[in-house]
Amino acid sequence: MNDVPRGRLKVYLGAAPGVGKTYRMLDEAQRRASRGADVVVGYVECHGRPRTEAMTAGLASVARLRCGYRGGEFEEMDVAAVLARRPAVAVVDEFAHTNIPGGGRHPKRWQDVEDLLAAGVDVITAVNIQHLESLKDVVEKITGVPQHETVPDDVVRKAEQIEFVDIPPEGLRRRMAHGNIYAPEKVDAALANYFRPGNLTALRQLALLWVADRVDEALQSYRAEHAIGGVWETRERVVVALTGGPEGDTLVRRAARIADRSGGDLLAVHVARSDGLAAGVSHASLARQRRLVEDLGGSYHSVVGDDVATALVDFAHAENATQLVLGTSRRGRLERFLTGPGTGETVTELSGDIDVHRVTHERAGRGTLLPSRRRTLSTRRLIAGPVAGLVLPVLLTVALAQVRGTVNLTSEALLFLLAVVGVACIGGVTSAVIASVTASLLLNYWFIPPIGQFTLDDPNALLALGVFAVVAATVAAVVDRSLRLSRRAARATAEAETMSSLAGSIVRGGQTIPALLERTRETFGMDSAELVDELPDGADATAVPAGPGNYLVLRGRTPSSSERRVLAAFAAHVGSAVERARLAQAAAEVEPVRAADRMRTALLRAVGHDLRTPLAAGWAAVTSLRSREVEFSPEDRDELLATAEESMVRLSRLVDNLLDLSRLEAGVLTLNLRATALEEVLPTALADTPTAEVHGEPEDMPPLLADPPLLERVIANLVGNAARYSPPGARVLVTASALAGRAELRIIDRGPGLPAGGRDRLFEPFQRLGDTDNTTGLGLGLALARGLTEAMDGTLTPEDTPGGGLTMVVSLPLAGRTQPIRTAQHVGGAT
């Protein structure tokens, strides 16, 4: 089986039911079959649509697997039969479907499809956007309908082909109105609820955006595989460069407007510079601008670069950006004249196909004068220094020769010394030595008597030459040291800034291992970053240890030695994330065992008293009745029998609760969900609580989807608990209502309510909040009620009763989701 090539998965994705996914899927199956492919229908649900059923004609199919569940019979895909048939292509509908227990190899159909793919079978399937796990909550907010059948995004994302089946909302509603999707009796309810124009438009947009992101991922992967560095303007991406200055807010808003007009993405990038140009950077401003970018729907990025312009352009090319926004220079005219072109001009020259926007702002031209464009010896200065060491003393000699006689020798010597110091500041030690030798010779020849002759045998001349050399070397050494220290400080600042940004991202949460790897790749401008368990082969890979047995591998350019220090810190963070994930997994595996231990401990403690109390009372009553030493009156005999009966009833109820709770914990509780009317469960549930009173008309409520005996147990436990804590003579009110496809039962008491901080522990078994009387039970009632409610796909939540007391709200789905919603009458002020 391992030698069989994996099958290919094709997914037809739709925004809503009825857009035509199944039809298109079968149409492709017919085309493949006509070309000679062995196509088999593994499972297709036509929903009684004639045109869809017609598309199955001529296609081979595998008999479905029939299985019984909760008194009904259901059909599922027979995975074993499909594998035994070994077709080239299998058509499998409803990718997110949950299999009936015992009806499939796995709980989910997408897991069955994985078995087919592993066996080399190509699969064509279909799924709606609301069934993607990442969009489940968003769809529920839009439509009000919770989604219980989902498929992980990664499973769909890994499909070789994803085809979007689209239809405008009005077209889909017309299709619905013509009866082409649902049965006629369901059309009106569907059009008024799930299939409203706004819902369909929102779902369509979600689907389009999701598919667009997948297409973008495929494009980026293709560009990386084929080493394509040029910009492909398939989607507008606007990159805004942030310096940490006050003008950043203006740039971000302007870039956001550009991105909005083009419907593109907004990316903000800050270069943590290592070339010394860190003046004007405000980390508080960067933090504020980062929040602004995220509020506007963009993303913030930080990269390290020795050259700001190159780093910006490299980042823009790596992200396939189409537009680059940066502010005009804050340097004044004099500084621009002295220091040459700035970042903006260089970016424009290097941008290539990327459009560059230079945005003016109120800080333009108001920066402080910098002594140099760079604080380390650039190539320009390394060339200019020796040239200045030769030319500047000559020019000074020419100038002083014109004013000979007006300036004495001392002043001339000081001017030459000043020129040497200036050259040392420009070009460093080598330039200073060249300047000192040139200046000494010129001073000796032109200005020290006898003029026009070299007097190198004169001790004074030799001393002057030596002083010039020593002064020049000293000044040059000081300048060089200060520049090196400045470079180190700037590099340290850049590294600290980058690590601070990384640490801030981790503290804010959401930094999973893939996100950390992507951030590492982005920060260092690499082609890829991955976590492996062995050292890679190949000279183009840079590997850094990231914890025991793990290596962070980057491919692309070779990082510098200073970048490797930051890279080591990133690797440490990645290693920590791996270790946290491992510990979290270990904790998750241990937690069920701990929970079971806590349950057993609590149970043993409870059994020690709570079960003995009714057992002791019943035992004493029976023992007394069996005694021949005491003659009981008929009244005493009846009282003893009543005590024994009450004790046995309490003991039986406690044992039943324990058994039900253990079934819930083990996940083996048998449910029989069906349409259940409230009037068939309320009388029995309230029979043991004479103080309970139903308000409203339960018969007006639509039927619930519930297990009647379990719903009866839930209501009985809640009503009994409310009666236990209600003051003498107070009534327990029970009301019912229905809204948005769900029913709500409210059990209202006027008791003391919840103590401070008690809501979190309310549903823990084997405890009673604020109750020191341990003769009233194990404290299982509310825990069992919540467990049974959640088993029926419901919720149980506590609320404060207005005016004092506690209200328990049971929410369950209605049996008929598409029928008109009716609400039972409420008593004023009851809820």
Image (spheres, rainbow, N blue to C red):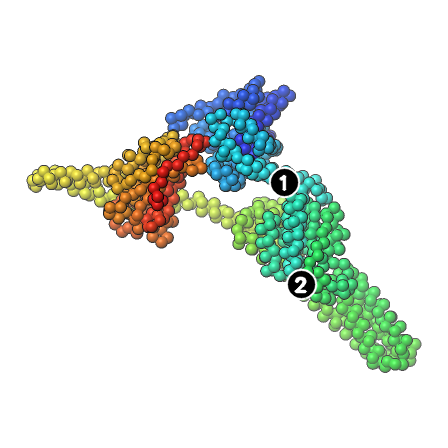
Q: Residue 388: x and y, percent?
A: 82, 67
Identify the secondary structure beneath mark 2. loop
Quick check: 445 above or below 280? below
Type of amino acid at the residue the image marks with label 2:
Ala
Point 58% across, 54% down: residue: 291
Q: Would you say 357 lies left or right of 619 here?
A: right
The answer to whether the residues at label 1 and label 2 have Cβ atoms under 8 Å apart is no
Mark 1 or mark 2: name the one nearer the start of the chain: 1
Q: Quadrant of the C terminus?
A: top left
Name the residue nearer the viewer: 341 or 585: 341
Q: Residue 629: x and y, percent?
A: 7, 41
Q: Would you say 71 lies left or right of 46 here?
A: left
Give residue 644's quadrant in the image.
Answer: top left
Circle 2 residue: 279
Q: CA distance from mark 1 to mark 2?
A: 38 Å
Q: Residues within 10 Å of mark 2 (few under 14, many from 20)?
A: few
Q: Residues within 10 Å of mark 1 (few under 14, many from 20)?
A: few
Point 67% across, 42% down: residue: 235
Q: Would you say 14 lies left or right of 730 here?
A: right
Q: Residue 464: x and y, percent?
A: 82, 78
Give residue 637's quadrant in the image.
Answer: top left
Type of amino acid at the residue the image marks with label 1:
Glu
Circle 1 residue: 217
Residue 21 in sight here: no
Q: Residue 661: x and y, percent?
A: 34, 39
Point 56% across, 27% down: residue: 175
Identify the secondary structure beneath mark 1. helix
Residue 649 in sight here: yes
- For residue 453, the mark is none
Point 63% across, 38% down: residue: 215
Q: Quadrant of the N terminus?
A: top right
